[in-house]
Image (cartoon, rainbow, N blue to C red):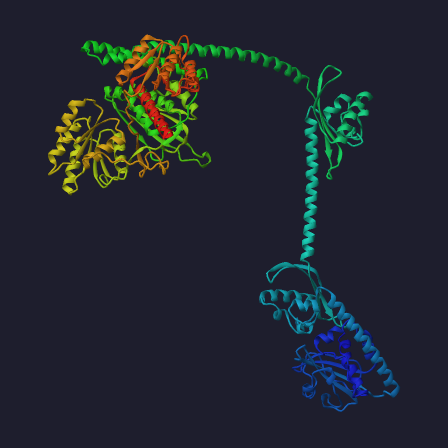
Amino acid sequence: MLVGALAVPAFWLVYHAIDPDYVDPFAYRAGYGGFMLALWSLTYVSSIVRRTVWALALIASTGLVVYFTWLGALNGLDVPWTVGVLAAGSASVLAVAPYARTVRQVWAAVGLLVGALIGALVAVGAMSDGALMIGGYFVVLATLAGIGATAQVRIRRALWEGREALKSRERLLRTVIDAIPEHIYVKDREGRCLVRNRYSAEHMGFDDPAEAVGLTVFDQSEDPEVAAGYWEEEERVMETGDPVLDHEERYAYDGKTGWLETSRIPLRDENDAVVGLIGITRDVTEKKEARAAILEAKEAAEAREAEVAEQRRLLRTIVDAVPDFIYAMDREGRFTLRNKASLAPHGIDDPEAAVGMSEFDLFPEDLAQTYWTDNRRVMESGEPLINRVESTRDGGFVSTTKVPLVGPGGEITGLVGISRDVTAEKAAEAGLIEAKEAAEAAQVAAEDATRAKSEFLANMSHEIRTPMNGVIGMTSLLLDTALDSEQRDFVETIRTSGDALLTIINDILDFSKIEAGMLSLETHPFEIRTCVEEALDLVAPPAAAKGVELAYLVEDGVPRTVRGDVTRVRQVLVNLLSNAVKFTEAGSVCVRVDSAPPDPEAGTLADVRFAVEDTGIGIAPDKLEAVFESFSQADASTTRQYGGTGLGLSICRRLVEMMGGEVGVESELGVGSTFTFSIEAEVAPSEKRVFLRSEQPALQGRRVLVVDDNDVNREILSRLSTRWRMHPVAVRSGAEALAAYEASLAEGRPYDLVLLDMQMPQMDGLDVARGIVARAPGRPPVLVMLTSIHREGSLRDEARQAGVHAVLYKPTKPSQLYDALIEAFEGRPAARSVPEASTPPAPRTADAPTAWVARPAAPESSAGNLRMLLAEDNVVNQKVAVRLLGRLGYTVDVVANGAEAVAEVERRAGFGEGYDVVLMDVQMPVMDGLTATRAIRASGTVTDQPHIVALTANAMEGDREACLDAGADDYLSKPVQLDSMREAMDRAARRRSAASTARDVVRA
């Protein structure tokens, strides 16, 4: 094959011999690539060459014979060249090297070969790469002996034809391989590139394929290891002679990855020796990805088919398990599906046997025609038929639903139907109708019973509270008269018994209201701290009488003001506190209030938690839950010893649950109990109040010694001191207090303030105060004593003599302690600050360190300035009300019923001396209070409407609302106490004053 490759320069050799001036227009570059491109197309030329006498040699630039072929005798001369040895006389051959860069510069020479004169033409040419670098030389020898003119012409014609065929085939070959979008290349045994098509060269960064000729993989790859791997594979092909076909390998180049498919085929000469290899490499990334996609799609399709098959199997299982008749049909009425239940009446076991049937195959013709008419209407209109109930021929009932089956293009392809035997349901429905009618009748009866119960409770409330109002009211008035000690003891006993009886009555009535569902909650803003303080005030007298200390602590983070029913919250607190005081013979009762962290999803709702702790008798574990049951206490002995109805805790639990909370208890016998409850309330902005600053220069930095044997009291006083920027140290006894004070003197940092408990074992507060004053080198610290003993005159005198600046009674309110400290350190009352109306204070937590401490402003007194009318039919209650109002400084006119009240109000209005306040009993003969209130409000004579306060002994739900709806301005429940009457009159005075100011503004 290499003979054919060397045939081209042989043509030039002959043409130069015949026509020395011939210039080849082919301009063929004599490089490795030029020779090897002819390997597949020179068969014809080779046959011509073999008809002459030739010797062909390929010699490297070093003089090494790379290739030699001896084609015949050269006038009997043997040329001693063999492959792999230096050519003899190579110096003579190399002498023409500077002139032999291209084939067009070939000279004919005689006698230059191995120094011998022979009758032959010798052509020597350089073989260069694309950059004209000489890589070796070719030598062509031809004998001209015996060639005549005719032969020369024949040779010339044959060579010309061969040259043209060669050029045509070479152009075709180059065009073909350059048009193939794959990497095509030919390499020799040393791995040097002999041929590379344009696609491969351009992908390697070459503009001309000839530029890649002569390069190895080591020249082309930046990674020696990768190059070594390629060369190892190529060398294996050439060593073994075994081709490698369609070998796939992964590549990563220029930020891209993909797959290459390579075939390497060994290149052999005419002796079947491997002289190189032919390689074809194609990028099969897209093909591989497409193949993977096809495989994936195939697997997905198979999975879908399996899923569809499974769904069909599942659908068939479900459909066949349903006892209803399920079926589907196409537009022609042929069944595509029927379940087993629908075929059982027809004796068909295999549902597949019904596919293709119609209703005419299963039912009598008239019935089938009716079904088909319905089916056709559904399919033609597209309107479903839903739950149509029809009677059957056997007296039963069937409910049928038929819906159109819609194809992918929106066209109706059939329908799906379900028929169900509803005979039992129809029977049950009839029973339900009867039961509903019976229930409605029972409800009417229940409502009648509830109404009767409500009326009974109202009457009981009125009938019981009215005489109780007289008993308690008159007893209170009697205690204000001159009585000797025995008489006072009798009256106190009557009052105490009356209060106990009223408590029992209230519990029973409250429980009855809850049981009857007639108790509703009100929603108004209230301050949690004030509510707790008011509850503690109510139980303070019995606690003081027993020597039980009261305390409370509102934790940081508790909202100051919330919206809810303060009356019911206070009722629960008072009930729990009353029980705690009742069952605690010695020790303390403490109220703690905290709040759960705010929940963003709850918005402004707060979960406020109350705990009432006592050191009382405790409750056995097996009795804890029973204490919340109605008419139940821990045991029978508790009722005998302490009294009570056993309703209080049950009412508390019901009230707390109505407020969205829950009640709980923890207790230990002989140690004490902790009752807890929570409410869910909306956080409300604080109303305009009078405030005390917690940042007070007179207090900041003061050293405080807290002396109290009660752990809770020490904690509360220490936290209050810290909140007011003072530095507390707490001790638990008088001896420790004196030791601590002496230590402070020794350090040169004596205490500025000592907060003393009065009742302590071994050494009481007065003894401690005397000891501190005696030890003080100069002016003693400010001493403030806290006590649960109400000995007003003697205790204050003793305390003053002992050097105490102030005595406060427990439970001590923060505002009271604050006032006492400011007055002690500055010699003046605490300064007050009222925020501007235009900038009301933002809602703050009750105990926040930088918060304002709220205190209600004192109400104005308007005694004697109001004209008042009392409408009350009961003589005793008239006396009580007149006396209570007289105690408050008011005079009052009295009438006996509502009609008289209306007449008197209109009469006084006619004289221009209308009443300011009307106290209106609700239940009176002739005309009740609500009717009278409406009449006064509707009267055209009464232009200056009075402030009407409704008085009722009723205990039922809606009492307050009914009074206010009738036109009343306020509401008082009997028995009316002095404090509640005073508060009601203060509200009336403020309202009348505001109304008078408004009228003056209008007149102006």
Q: Is residue 447 left or right of residue 113?
A: left
Residue 219 is at least partly visible in this image: yes
Residue 407 position by quadrant: top right
Task: Look at the picture and state if 875 lies above or below 4.
Answer: above
Front one among 730 and 430: 430
Q: Is residue 45 left or right of residue 724?
A: right
Q: Residue at x 73, y 89 (%)?
A: 112
| Quadrant location, the C terminus | top left
Task: Look at the picture and state if 60 lies above or below 702.
Answer: below
Front one among 374 and 589: 374
Front one among 674 and 49: 674
Q: Is residue 669 left or right of residue 328?
A: left
Q: Residue at x 77, y 70 (%)?
A: 173
Q: Where is residue 116 drawn, in percent x and y?
A: 74, 90
Q: Is residue 337 left or right of residue 573?
A: right
Q: Where is residue 234 drawn, in percent x and y?
A: 66, 66
Front one among 839 and 565: 839
| Quadrant location, the N terminus | bottom right
